Amino acid sequence: MRNLHLSLVAIFVSISLIILGGCLGKGTQEPTRLYMLQPLASSETNTEAGAVDDAFSLRVGPIRLPEYLNRPQIVTRTEENKIQLGVFHHWGEPLERNFASVLALNMSNLLSTTNIILHPWAKKEDVKYILAVDVIRFDGEFNGNATLHARWYLTHWEDDNPKVLATRISRYTETVGGESYENLVVAESRALEAFSREIAEVIKGLPQEGAGQ
């Protein structure tokens, strides 16, 4: 009986330690923080009304990310060829979706139009232009720079035939003013803003009348 009593005591103590350890672990675990890219405010665009004609329409997407970015964790670069994942610092939604929606909002503000549709919610024959983006790099270094490096294509479909109007490789860097993920995401948003402005300027330079006829 004494041995049985000691065994029961030992089991009770072990279970108590496990429960206590779990409670302490929950209390000390760092909460996961979520971040979102921010679009350009309409008050900052200073664009004239009628930047494009009323018949203008643009589909934004597909947006393709490199595999190292297809994850919830925010990626930072500690060296040119070394990356690090933010264990407790995640994107609030898949980065591909956040990138596309912010790019679409930026284009809407910069072109003074609401005729911007996200892929895949429009067929190629339903819009005048299609903007596709292959992101090569989108990350940053604390107290360094955030970098957006991408190849993009602007296409017009006519009679089921694609006509490539522009294809470019663009690279933008923005200073990350600190060592926080907030600083990094703000800098990445600025890089995406600069990228959006370049594309908008190309679109404004296209002949609007008769496009798609």
Image (cartoon, grey):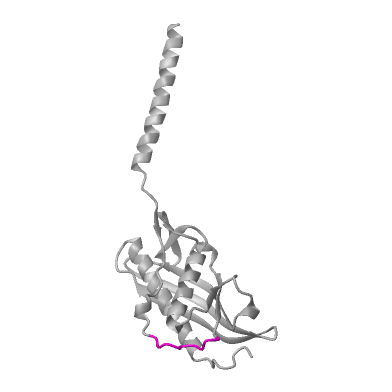
56 up-or-down from 62: above or below: below
29 up-or-down from 154: above or below: above
104 up-or-down from 183: above or below: below
- What is the magenta range? 47-55
Left or right of 206, for residue 6: left
Quadrant (top left, top right, bottom left, bottom right) of the N terminus: top left
What secondary structure prevails in the magenta region?
A: loop
- Looking at the image, which residue sits at the far right? 160
- Looking at the image, which residue sits at the far left? 178
Left or right of 144, for residue 135: right
Viewer-nearest residue: 191 or 207: 207
Is residue 178 covered in magenta? Answer: no
Image spot of residue 128 (x, y percent) = 59, 84
| Corner quadrant of residue 33 | bottom left
Q: Which residue is rendered at x = 40% and y = 30% of the image?
A: 19
Q: Which residue is rendered at x = 54% and y = 85% of the image?
A: 56
- Looking at the image, which residue sits at the far top? 1
Viewer-nearest residue: 53 or 59: 53
Image spot of residue 5 (x, y percent) = 43, 11
| Corner quadrant of residue 162 | bottom right
Residue 146 at least partly seen = no
- Looking at the image, which residue sits at the far front? 54
Viewer-nearest residue: 97 or 112: 112
Quadrant (top left, top right, bottom left, bottom right) of the C terminus: bottom right
Left or right of 110, for residue 180: left
Viewer-nearest residue: 13 or 47: 47
Image spot of residue 208 (x, y percent) = 54, 91
Image spot of residue 139 (x, y percent) = 43, 67
Q: Which residue is rendered at x = 36% and y = 84% of the image?
A: 46
Residue 90 at least partly seen = yes
